[in-house]
Image (cartoon, rainbow, N blue to C red):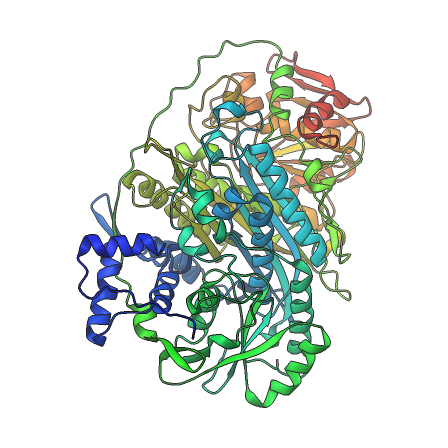
């Protein structure tokens, strides 16, 4: 029999316990190791390597979210779980009837119409991408597709939000063991492209950012939305149901993936943890998807009683979670392997891709096996769910692991952490007033964070499945869409609107960063006609054991709570990726900028009324909705001058919500020809993008812009105040638009012209910006025009 190792922990002292945790890459704390030791002392035996690894996977930060569930001491208060006290609490308070499943399954599920529901999930795959950009990003995409499949839905779109170090970073300055950002970006984009395109799932929404803080720790957020008949959603495994493993074979790839994700990266990570990166095969996953949909739809009820993704933690997490209220017995020797020689613990925790676990009533086994066989997809019974609340693992008939489900899922000691954070006030740059800001605008348009991502977008198939209404690029001049719009059903005009908000430059004020990300995601959605919006939160952060990092996290979570309640937009799912730090050989540690991605999914009753951001016709008016304030903290204008000082943009959710509701009414009545949000680079960048996207000129009068205490052209041009939207309105609809917008802050500030010139007149009526739209478009497109390299 394959050797099973007994790990001697019963008599181990504290130092020896931590050595065991490190040796076996368990990523467990001393308190957690002591809890395991106490459990096995009661059992009067040492654990096997299978049992110890099972506990480590289940208790990992990745699977258990122990920081978000732990006790935090902050500003004299005790927070008993960030997740429960803030994010889930906001959703519970809002109590929306259209939320079907939130924070309890592989993906959040909300109603689409009377018959169908949509599932949404965004995952992170940061550490694997740092070691293997192609494999890490690709399997992140494949994994989130399986999250959608894991609730019985068919994936209909993919999203990706990526962050890398500066593309022009000098090679000679790279820390040991770190790949150049350009290599990382090309590999990650190729991995996402190949997985999505081969699965036939359109990649339709995303963002890419660059900052030196991501040099050693790139970020990959992979998202997906799926659709399903609401009545087909089932999660009810029963004792006696068979455990069916379907899809790919099991190998050594991805072993310790979730425990590796709970460690900081070092110069040695590539050597010691490359096996934690999974290897993807999208063709196998496509077969799994096709078979799964047939098993769901063949009869009135699905042929399975539960289905889940086999992702982080492998079979250990998938079966352990599905059977936590039941019990399970698993024969590890029955698991199909890629090659011989895997130890039982390796089979059990491997994160080999394209695998899913189903609970099958015995009477349905023959039918479901035929479906998977017809699709040329491997399916193997490897065990059975029981009612004894024990997890029993066998290999060749011999028990190699036996754990109480209650201890496995509830025995983890709650982490207790102290959070502290004091706001650093960065001084504003003292800039002399000048007459012309055309060069400033072009420099911001050429910043890689703002510039066109066409080189990436064109590699993704964003029209496969023939559902895409508003695509990532808009208009003759191919400007940047605010959101994507999809029509998922053949016999209905009802659509889905998907958008995102993220700006790590605002992390100097994490509370307002969170509010800003929520507002940006919502206003991007509204710009295309979205309403009845639900949110997802994805936190990528540094080491939460460091008080200042955790303090920033607490403020950001509070911002999420206030934003969700203020906009009446519930959170339906989320994910945290912590420990995004790199430790140098000298022991110095560098954290990523605190990064919060907010994803938004809205509904549009009729996709034929969806609005894109490119201007349509000369003579139409340009309106601005919202107030412009002295809010340039973290702005791209101040970045030009080497500063991140000043006030980070704030949000008034009630005021913004009222304005957005009025705008939606105007869109529904056909009064709006184009709509674009003001975000990075402010009013000047948004107006320029609208103009060159529509290949038309534009004239703007700054003196007509509603402002609060602003008397300088540059601040009105480049302030990044939230809740502002530029709107194109035909002259014939002007009075109707004004009636609908009454009671909100808005103003007519310009019009679309035939001239193909872009002019913004300053407060003194002299041009503050003047250029041809072709010149502005070239500034925006040139930086990432990588076709020849």
Q: Residue at x 20, y 68 (%)?
A: 38
Image coordinates for residue 33, horizontal then vertical, percent: 25, 60
Q: In the rendered view, does 566 fall on the left or right side of 48?
A: right
Looking at the image, which residue sits at the far right? 754
- Residue 484's place in the image compared with 45, above or below, is above
Q: Quadrant of the C terminus?
A: top right
Res. 733 image quadrant = top right
Q: In the rendered view, does 153 fall on the left or right side of 556?
A: right
From the viewer's side, name the closer residue of 464 and 4: 4
Res. 747 image quadrant = top right
Image coordinates for residue 509, horizontal then vertical, percent: 39, 34
Residue 679 appears in the figure: no
From the viewer's side, name the closer residue of 164 and 444: 164
Q: In the rendered view, does 30 fall on the left or right side of 576?
A: left
From the viewer's side, name the closer residue of 579 and 131: 131
Image coordinates for residue 65, horizontal then vertical, percent: 38, 57
């Amino acid at each position: 029999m394959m050797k099973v190792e007994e790990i001697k922990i019963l008599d181990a002292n504290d130092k020896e316990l931590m050595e065991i945790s490190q040796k076996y890459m368990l990523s467990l704390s001393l308190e957690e190791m002591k809890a395991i030791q106490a459990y096995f002392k009661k059992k009067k035996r040492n654990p096997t390597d299978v049992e110890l690894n099972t506990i480590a996977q289940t208790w990992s930060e990745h699977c258990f979210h122990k920081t978000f569930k732990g006790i935090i001491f902050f500003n004299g208060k005790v927070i008993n779980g960030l997740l429960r006290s803030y994010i889930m609490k906001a959703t519970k308070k809002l109590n929306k009837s259209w939320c079907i499943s939130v924070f309890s399954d592989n993906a959040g599920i909300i109603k689409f119409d009377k018959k169908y529901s949509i599932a949404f999930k965004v995952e992170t795959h940061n550490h694997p991408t740092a070691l293997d950009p192609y494999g890490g990003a690709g399997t992140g995409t494949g994994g989130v597709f399986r999250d959608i499949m894991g609730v019985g839905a068919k994936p209909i779109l993919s999203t990706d939000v990526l962050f890398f170090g500066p593309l022009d970073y000098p090679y000679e300055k790279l820390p040991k063991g770190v790949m150049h950002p350009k290599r990382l970006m090309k590999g990650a984009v190729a991995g996402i492209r190949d997985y999505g395109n081969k699965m036939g799932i359109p990649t339709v929404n995303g963002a890419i950012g660059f900052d030196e803080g991501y040099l050693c720790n790139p970020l990959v957020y992979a998202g997906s939305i799926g659709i399903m008949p609401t009545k087909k959603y089932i999660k009810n495994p029963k004792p006696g149901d068979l455990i069916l493993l379907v899809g790919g074979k099991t190998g050594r790839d991805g072993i310790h993936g979730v425990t590796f994700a709970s460690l900081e990266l070092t110069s040695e990570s590539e050597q010691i943890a490359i096996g934690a990166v999974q290897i993807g095969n999208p063709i196998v996953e496509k077969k799994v998807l096709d078979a799964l949909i047939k098993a769901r739809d063949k009869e009135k009820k699905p042929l399975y009683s539960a289905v889940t993704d086999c992702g982080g933690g492998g079979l250990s997490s998938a079966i352990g979670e599905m059977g936590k209220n039941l019990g399970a017995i698993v024969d590890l020797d029955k698991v199909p392997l890629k090659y011989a020689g895997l130890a039982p613990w390796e089979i059990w925790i491997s994160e080999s891709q394209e695998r899913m676990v189903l609970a099958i009533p015995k009477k349905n086994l023959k039918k479901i096996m035929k479906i998977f066989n017809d699709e040329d997809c491997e399916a193997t019974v490897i065990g059975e769910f029981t009612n004894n609340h024990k997890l029993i693992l066998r290999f060749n008939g011999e028990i190699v692991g036996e754990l109480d489900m209650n201890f496995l899922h509830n025995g983890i000691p709650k982490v207790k952490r102290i959070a502290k954070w004091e706001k650093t006030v960065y001084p504003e740059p003292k800039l002399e007033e000048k007459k012309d800001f055309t060069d400033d605008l072009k420099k911001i348009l050429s910043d890689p964070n703002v510039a066109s991502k066409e080189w990436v977008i064109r590699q993704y198939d964003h029209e496969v499945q023939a559902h895409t209404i508003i695509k990532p690029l808009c208009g003759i001049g191919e400007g940047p869409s605010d959101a994507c719009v999809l029509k998922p059903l053949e016999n209905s005009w009802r659509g889905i609107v998907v958008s995102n908000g993220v700006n790590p430059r605002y992390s100097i004020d994490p509370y307002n960063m969170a509010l800003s990300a929520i507002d940006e995601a919502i206003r991007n959605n509204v710009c295309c006609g979205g309403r009845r919006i639900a949110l997802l939160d994805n936190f990528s952060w540094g080491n939460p054991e460091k008080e200042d990092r955790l303090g920033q996290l607490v403020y950001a979570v509070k911002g999420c709570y206030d934003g969700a309640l203020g906009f009446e937009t519930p959170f339906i799912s989320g994910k945290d990726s912590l420990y995004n730090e790199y430790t140098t050989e000298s022991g110095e540690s560098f954290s990523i900028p605190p990064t919060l991605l907010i994803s938004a999914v809205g509904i549009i009753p009729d996709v034929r009324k969806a609005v894109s951001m490119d201007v349509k016709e000369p003579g139409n008016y340009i309106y601005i909705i919202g107030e412009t304030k002295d809010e340039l903290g973290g702005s791209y204008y101040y970045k030009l001058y080497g500063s991140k000082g000043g006030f980070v943009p704030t949000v008034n959710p009630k005021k913004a919500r009222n304005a957005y509701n009025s705008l939606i009414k105007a869109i529904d009545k056909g009064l709006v020809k184009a709509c674009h949000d003001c975000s990075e680079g402010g009013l000047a960048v948004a107006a320029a993008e609208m103009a060159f996207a529509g290949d038309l000129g534009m004239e703007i009068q700054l003196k007509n812009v509603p402002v609060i205490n602003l008397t300088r052209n540059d601040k009105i041009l480049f302030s990044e105040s939230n809740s502002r939207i530029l709107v194109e309105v035909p002259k014939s609809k002007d009075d109707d638009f004004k009636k609908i917008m009454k009671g909100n802050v808005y103003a007519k500030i310009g019009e679309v012209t035939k001239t193909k010139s872009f002019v913004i007149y300053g407060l003194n009526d002299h041009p503050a910006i003047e250029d041809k739209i072709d010149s502005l478009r070239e500034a925006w497109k040139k930086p990432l025009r990588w076709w020849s390299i």
